[in-house]
Amino acid sequence: MTAKPLVAGNWKMNPAAANFTELASAIADEIDKIDGVVKVLCPPTVALREVATVLEGRDVLVGAQDGHPEPSGAYTGEVAMGMLGQICSHVIVGHSERRALFGETDHVVAQKAVAAIANGLSPIVCVGESLDIRDAGDAIKFVHDQIVGSLTGVDNPSSVVIGYEPVWAIGTGVSARPDVAGEMAESIRNTLMDLYGDEAALAIPILYGGSVSPENIGPYIDRPHINGALVGGASLKPNDFGQIVSLVASIRG
Ligand code: PEP
């Protein structure tokens, strides 16, 4: 079984004007009818229910950008995976911004991935090297170790999605060369095969993320182990996001 193509839009802490309904419906109008690709919108937590309502009856899913591994308790400001599971199908865990700005380690990311799965959510587990690590020639080993660490305790990966996002490509306009991303995706696939066996590993979607646009998405999706995209900036532009989903569908769908 090969992985189903997937495109997820990470809105991050946007849009500032908080016109969530407007943005979600404009995007849904662009992508609703595109078949062969799983489509996920990840708005800020405060907008999850609103966006889920807009997407009701449409072929577009809702994802959260993070979640807490504990089921409940004294964690001010946090939202439990179980709470998210009532609204969402997916949750991003270990985004590089969370790792860098909020000190999330592979251990924490793994706890989140395990809790997400236990609550019926598909975790989009993000990994990726910094420019220093790439320049030192250590990117493949670093990401291998991140995958192993971030999936510790995940025994059944059937709902897992991997987002490969080189840190230096996120929000910079400098996307990774498709052959570089393709080489990393192949290495990630090999790591997943070592962890879970060939059949299960081949069914795990591996997404490329980092300054994806309608202009550059094609050559990534041409790579055999890249099954879709995790899109930041361009996911706030309905037309651009629509074109990205449509190109992924035409190449992979
Ligand atoms: C992201 O935030 O996951 C991302 C890939 O952002 P951008 O597409 O803006 O680089």
Image (cartoon, rainbow, N blue to C red):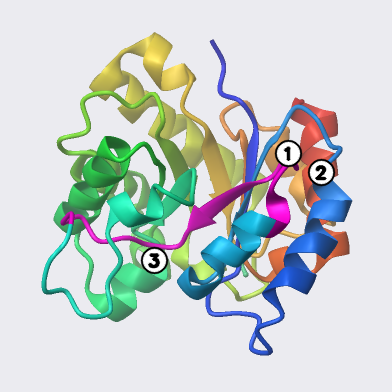
Neighbour tally class for label 1: few under 14, some 14-19, many 20 plus, Cα within 10 Å: some
- Asked if 157 appears above or below 197 in the picture, the reply is below
Image marks 2 and 1: residues in contact by CB distance under 8 Å: yes
Image marks 2 and 3: residues in contact by CB distance under 8 Å: no
Check disc 3 and report its element: helix, strand or loop: helix
Residue 69 belongs to the span the image colors magenta: yes
- Find residue 54 and report its horizontal and vertical position in percent: 71, 58
In terms of sequence position, does the residue under pointer 2 or pointer 1 come before the other? 2
User: Which quadrant holds residue 34?
Assistant: top right
Looking at numbered disc 2 in the image, what kind of residue is underneath it?
Asp
Query: What residue is shown with label 1?
Result: 59
User: Which quadrant holds residue 189?
Assistant: top left
Alpha carbon distance from label 2 to label 3: 29 Å
Q: Which mark is residue 135?
A: none
State yes or no: Cβ of the residue under disc 3 lies below 8 Å from any atom of ligand 1: yes
Badge nearest the viewer, 1 or 3: 1
Looking at numbered disc 3 in the image, what kind of residue is underneath it?
Ser
- Find residue 222 and report its horizontal and vertical position in percent: 73, 32
Inspect this view and state whether residue 34 appears: yes
In the depicted view, which residue is nearer to us: 91 or 54?
54
As drawn, which residue projects farthest toward the left?
74
Total marks in image? 3
Residue drawn at x 36%, y 36% is 120
Query: What residue is shown with label 2?
Result: 32
Q: Which mark is residue 96?
A: 3
In the depicted view, which residue is nearer to us: 149 or 187?
149
- Asked if 222 appears above or below 142 in the picture, the reply is above
- Asked if 31 appears above or below 41 in the picture, the reply is above
Q: Main secondary structure of the magenta part?
A: loop
